[in-house]
Amino acid sequence: MPIRIGLIGKTNTGKTTFFNAATLQYAEVSSYPFTTKQPNYGTTYAITPCVCREFNVQDNPRNSLCIEGYRHIPIELIDLPGLIKGAWAGKGLGNQFLSVASQADALIHVVDASGSVDEEGKITKMGVGNPLADFYDIQEELVMWLMRLIDRQDDKIVRNLKSGKEFAETLAEVLQGIKVNEYHIEEALKQTGLRGEEFDKWTMLEDKKFAEKLLEISKPMIVLANKMDLETAGANFNILREELTNYMVIPASAEAELALRRAVQKGYVRYIPGEEDFKIVSEEQLTQEQKKALEFIQSRVFGEYMRTGVQFAINVAVFKLLGMGVVYPVSDPAKLADRSGKILPDAYLMPPNSTVRDLARTIHSELEKGLLYAIDVRSGLRLPGDYRIKDRDVLSIVSTTRRAV
Ligand SMILES: Nc1nc2c(ncn2[C@@H]2O[C@H](COP(=O)(O)OP(=O)(O)OP(=O)(O)O)[C@@H](O)[C@H]2O)c(=O)[nH]1
Ligand SMILES: [Mg+2]
């Protein structure tokens, strides 16, 4: 199962623009509120320097891509219908899709840093909207949604508790559909001081405090300050960064990234997503307007913020927020190849603290059954099944049941 990242946020903040830029799809974008009516699903890539350069080999990627020494590993991106204050009580459309958002491993909360969206979600004069208030409003919607979800299961939870089941186990059962586990629940109980308190006697305030904590723990989130190409965004970005100290806040221009990627598709521009520069290949093909737009992106976005922030946000979500490491399994440690001779064919994203055994299971359950050890290609050392793999490890798994890759 690939890693899933969900795009959430107030309507009109640029989620679908981000989605189209990252997946090269053509989902509908408009300046009307609530344009997206159903979630859009697509594939994008987490990008990391490939080990092929270190080993000085020409690789033959299979489950991923390698472009100019950078490994592109597929992940799933979900664009959700926009939210609005009051969504949990049925306002707008977004609320009914929060269950989809909650199946993501991480969330990117998109805000309009230029302040061009008013309270009702309509595009207004730049600078009139309040992105920080928008952020808190949407967070509140998520918390209320989760609170209600737990609330609806109250009877079942109390019944199970009476029959002697543990609280964390009971709640985890109820919330497994949204990827909340016992560990998340235990942590939330601990951090709110509610552990050992009787659940059916919690006050509303305690219910809410718990939902807030549970959300924070189970759904890692970064904040994307979008529309940084607009004049009013700079000041708001500083406010967001100063106030939201618990989050990584990333400046971005989804529209600039979309324009660049479309220009690449047409062959006008050379640009690798996430890079801090782009080059016009055929100036004569461009209209005056296109030239101006690219100049604007160069000075307003790259000049000020180095990058458009779209690829950067995806990489930060995967590698920093989720702490994923990249591992390259091979079957022939000398040639760095699989059985058919493909060099460094696969790259796997592995969660923090994963072991050789976890990697074997990820590749194939049969491989895990007869697992003996792994060979670390760099040192030639044998690594036991419980060895914690590191980012950029190149490993050859040795198993009695099935040969690696
Ligand atoms: N200036 C600027 N405008 C942007 C940017 N990203 C999106 N927009 C504009 O913002 C408006 C809304 O964009 P969408 O991508 O449809 O926003 P959304 O968040 O998906 O909206 P909903 O589907 O209603 O939730 C459109 O007019 C976009 O062109 C950006 O980085 N800069
Ligand atoms: Mg949309």
Image (cartoon, rainbow, N blue to C red):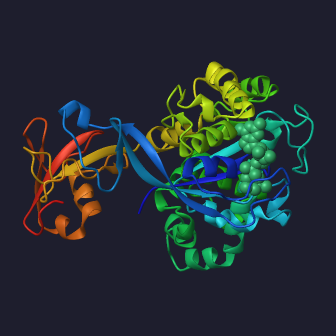
In front: 43, or 329? 43
Q: Quadrant of residue 80?
A: bottom right
Whole-percent x, y for residue 21 in the image: 60, 47
Q: Quadrant of residue 131?
A: top right
The residue located at (62%, 60%) in the rendering is: 101
Q: Is residue 95 above or below residue 387?
A: below
Whole-percent x, y for residue 199 in the image: 65, 64
Q: Is residue 271 left or right of residue 402?
A: right
Q: Is residue 132 left or right of residue 395?
A: right
In front: 28, or 366? 28
Q: Is residue 264 above or below residue 154?
A: above
Whole-percent x, y for residue 388 in the image: 24, 45
Q: Quadrant of residue 380?
A: top left
Q: Is residue 354 above or below residue 176?
A: above
Whole-percent x, y for residue 48 in the image: 38, 38
The residue located at (27%, 40%) in the rendering is: 390
From the image, which quarter does the C terminus lie in? bottom left
